[in-house]
Image (cartoon, grey):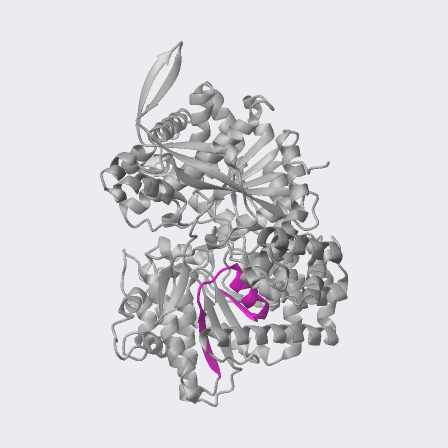
């Protein structure tokens, strides 16, 4: 659309939707008119794509994920249809700030962290590459939560992101699905076949809402299908007429709680039950929908030739027994035929090596909520044991690790390993750990199943949308081909030696830092120096991600400056953002610790503004788009071997931040991409960490006793230095470092890595004082970021695992 047609469309939407002209319209109405105009541009291509996919001509991917962290749609969609400059001109000519419209849009609350952001990035890249796919998840009414920081503590408020109309979604009432829970199963044999009679169950309707997924300058528009729960009965009139109004609505409230909140707290029986129901709810709705679409287009025995069901982490693992259930109970297949189809159709991505994150469900709960699915999993487990026995496996320790059911629990990762044709890790290091350690017994039997596909990011969003100044600078230097092929960024290598380009690059970074400094001042009242080093750690708050290590080093730097305020260090601003799970006490205490240190440091005039600490609340994609372009140090300091990949590290390097991190996850590959001299590596390796855990840990108390600097900062947790009114506030963190917990002291090796960590920070300080060297390193990081595009990840998934054909080929 040209400018005039865009203007006419906006005026039309305002007139016929709100009965207003531009001068009368509110910000909400203007946003809606602009958004509807963009949506109308997308709709025809979306309808055509759906029609072609419904024909069954192309093998289709169904990407199942419990979350999709999409970020806001409007600005990103305008970039992807390649109309960003036209829309900015229209806004300018109409006297409407483009940024005001972007800020107005609510960010969808359908994702939270790296898992969800990756799923959204993959859907966008699938579309960009013209590969047919559906993303399948839950339409959470309230998302995770809005994080507020009050008196230094995280407080959770409901994220009512649907308070305004979501203009991007289309309700598909013609495709409502019934999902059944509870009840009991009656088995009978007829004509040599097992017949299942499912009785006394209760039903919940799954209503699909479709959102168009727009790729960059692509020929197709894929679909994100999100399921919303609706009660079978809106109200119990019998109870209502008796005057018991709460009881009358109880069934509706309980049923629809399934799609209320992302990740309900599961440290109680009801929360655990709700999580299980959530996972089965969207999986069952999706698999039923797949079978319904498939029938009539091709015989179901050919399902794997036409469909791939990809299980993103273990949350959608119930896709395996649910597909078995439908093929057997509803389509009349025998076990062997159904299992053959299922195991050729389902693929699995593992995202963690941490045992506590590999989902397990209590058998009693599972049998109560999903009795038929339990029967199928029990049969899969029994047949697995028979196979192992036939193959001569008599090592009971090995069998115990591989079985799906053990210790009164159902192990979802093992279900995926048994029931999927492909298992992949998300970085080279992560996949090696899966093969050699976590799933070594499965790998020994099924080596052909294992693949490695390194995660990636939608690099266009993180440059063209989040950092237009750098995007324009890159285009001026190497042309526009990089927008289509991320490897073209390698053309920036030669510009790292160009002093004029380095100056322009640093000017862009300074402008972004000034913008972020203003945002910080407006939101927190903290004034930070844009000339200081912006040192950033933005991610979920978790012990293994080691925000605690970062905090201890800040205390160490603080102590150095108190001893000598004129010490020659470059001013440093430490910026944190991230959410802790509501029931994760230690993570929430770390947030309080960060804010207590910030209060102490930011108010200390003796430091001459050489050190500042900021915690920005309610981290999401929108906030990341403000922080990442301004970052200069990217803290990726997880305990080696614990982070599967990471994608924040990729976004930050793409925007010219230098990685300070351990050899963990994709940091290993970032180091390969940029060279040893352009990254700051410290700490233990994954093998060293594993050996410490394997052979009894290490003596953190000895480090504490023998290093005066360590002793000082650790003691400051409990001597009233940070909280004079309550010196015991951080006692549990102190104890965690020095005393055994579950047989392990300092599980994530914070004190073991501390000396190496503080040393690498001194190297950062020295090198930042040499701007020509620093900006050369920053440019080389951008030049090396192309291999971490989600386009590249999808190409690897497709060539190794999915084998989809491009639409139009």
Quadrant showing the C terminus: top right
The residue depicted at 31 percent of the width and 80 percent of the height is: 721
| Residue 118 position in % (x across, y down) | 54, 51
The answer to whether residue 551 shows anywhere in this view is: yes
| Residue 30 position in % (x across, y down) | 60, 59
Q: Eyeballing the image, is 392 above or below 682? A: above
Q: Quadrant of residue 733?
A: bottom left
Q: Eyeballing the image, is 675 above or below 177? A: below
Foreground of the two, 719 or 234: 234
Q: Is residue 245 left or right of residue 625?
A: left
Is 630 magenta? The answer is yes
| Residue 548 position in % (x across, y down) | 39, 67
Q: Quadrant of residue 45?
A: top right
Q: Is residue 502 left or right of residue 320?
A: right
The residue depicted at 32 percent of the width and 45 percent of the height is: 272
Foreground of the two, 698 or 32: 32
Q: Which residues are magenta?
A: 610-636
Q: Is residue 611 left or right of residue 151?
A: right
């Amino acid at each position: 659309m040209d400018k005039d047609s865009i203007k006419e469309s906006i005026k039309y939407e305002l007139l016929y939707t709100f009965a207003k002209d531009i001068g009368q319209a509110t910000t909400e109405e203007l946003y809606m008119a602009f958004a509807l105009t963009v949506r109308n541009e997308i709709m025809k291509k979306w309808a055509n794509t759906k029609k072609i996919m419904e024909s069954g001509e192309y093998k289709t991917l169904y990407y199942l994920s419990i979350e999709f962290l999409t970020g806001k749609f409007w600005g990103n969609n305008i970039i992807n249809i390649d109309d960003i400059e036209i829309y900015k001109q229209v806004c300018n000519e109409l006297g409407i700030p483009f940024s005001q419209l972007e800020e107005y849009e609510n960010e969808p609350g359908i994702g939270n962290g790296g898992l969800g952001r990756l799923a959204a990035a993959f859907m966008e890249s699938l579309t960009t590459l013209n590969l047919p796919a559906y993303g399948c998840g839950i339409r959470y009414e309230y998302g995770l939560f809005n994080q507020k920081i009050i008196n230094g503590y995280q407080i959770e408020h409901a994220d009512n992101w649907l308070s305004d109309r979501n203009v991007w979604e289309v309700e598909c009432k013609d495709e409502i699905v019934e999902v059944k829970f509870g009840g009991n199963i009656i088995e009978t044999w007829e004509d040599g076949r097992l017949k299942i009679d499912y009785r006394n169950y209760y039903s919940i309707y799954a209503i699909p809402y479709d959102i168009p997924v727009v790729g960059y300058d692509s020929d197709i528009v894929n679909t994100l299908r999100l399921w919303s729960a609706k009660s079978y009965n809106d109200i119990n009139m019998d109870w209502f007429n008796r005057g018991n109004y709460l009881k009358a609505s109880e069934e509706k409230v309980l049923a629809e709680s399934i799609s209320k909140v992302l990740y309900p707290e599961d440290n109680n029986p009801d929360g655990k039950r709700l999580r299980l129901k959530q996972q089965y709810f969207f999986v069952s709705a999706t698999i039923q929908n797949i079978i319904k679409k498939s029938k009539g287009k091709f015989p179901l025995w050919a399902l794997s030739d036409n469909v791939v069901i990809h299980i993103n982490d273990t949350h959608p693992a119930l896709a395996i027994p649910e597909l078995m259930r439908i093929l057997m109970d509803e389509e009349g297949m025998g076990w062997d035929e159904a299992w053959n189809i299922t195991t050729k159709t389902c693929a699995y991505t593992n995202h963690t090596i941490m045992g506590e994150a590999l989902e397990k469900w209590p058998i009693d709960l599972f049998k109560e909520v999903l009795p038929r699915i339990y029967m199928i999993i029990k049969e899969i487990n029994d047949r697995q044991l028979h196979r192992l026995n036939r193959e001569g496996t008599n090592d009971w320790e090995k069998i115990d690790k591989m079985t799906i059911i053990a210790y009164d629990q159902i192990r979802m990762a093992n279900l995926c390993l048994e029931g999927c044709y492909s298992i992949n890790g998300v970085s080279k290091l992560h996949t090696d750990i899966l093969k050699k350690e976590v799933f070594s017994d499965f790998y020994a039997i099924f080596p052909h199943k294992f693949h490695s596909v390194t995660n990636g990011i939608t690099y266009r969003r993180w440059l063209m949308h989040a950092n237009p100044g750098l995007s324009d600078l890159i285009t001026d230097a190497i042309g526009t081909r990089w927008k289509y092929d991320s490897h073209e960024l390698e053309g920036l290598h030669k510009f790292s030696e160009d002093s004029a380009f380095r100056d322009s690059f640093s000017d862009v970074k300074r402008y972004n830092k000034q913008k972020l400094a203003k945002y910080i001042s407006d939101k927190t009242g903290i004034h930070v120096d844009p000339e200081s080093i912006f040192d950033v750690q933005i991610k979920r708050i978790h012990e293994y991600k080691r925000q605690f290590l970062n905090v201890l080093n800040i205390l160490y730097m603080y102590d150095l400056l108190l001893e000598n305020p004129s010490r020659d260090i470059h001013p440093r601003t430490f910026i944190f953002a991230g959410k802790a799970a509501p029931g994760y006490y230690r993570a929430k205490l770390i947030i309080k610790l960060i804010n207590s240190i910030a209060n102490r440091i930011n108010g200390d005039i003796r430091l001459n503004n050489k050190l500042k600490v900021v915690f920005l609340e309610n981290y999401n994609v929108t906030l990341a788009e403000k922080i990442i372009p301004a970052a200069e140090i990217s803290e990726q300091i997880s305990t080696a071997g614990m982070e599967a990949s990471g994608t924040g590290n990729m976004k930050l390097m793409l925007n010219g931040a230098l990685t300070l991190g351990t050899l963990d996850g994709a940091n290993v590959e970032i180091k390969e991409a940029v060279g040893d001299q352009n990254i700051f590596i410290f700490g233990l390796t994954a093998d060293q960490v594993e050996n410490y855990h394997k052979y009894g840990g290490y003596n953190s108390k000895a480090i504490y006793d023998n290093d005066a600097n360590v002793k000082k900062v650790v003691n400051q947790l409990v001597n009233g230095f940070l909280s004079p009114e309550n010196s015991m506030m951080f006692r549990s963190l102190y104890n965690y470092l020095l005393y055994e917990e579950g047989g392990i002291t300092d599980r994530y090796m914070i004190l073991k890595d501390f000396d190496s960590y503080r040393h690498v920070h001194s190297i950062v300080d020295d090198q930042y004082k040499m701007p020509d060297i620093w900006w050369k390193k920053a440019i080389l990081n951008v030049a090396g970021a192309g291999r971490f595009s989600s386009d590249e990840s999808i190409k690897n998934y497709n060539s190794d695992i999915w084998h989809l054909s491009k639409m139009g080929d």
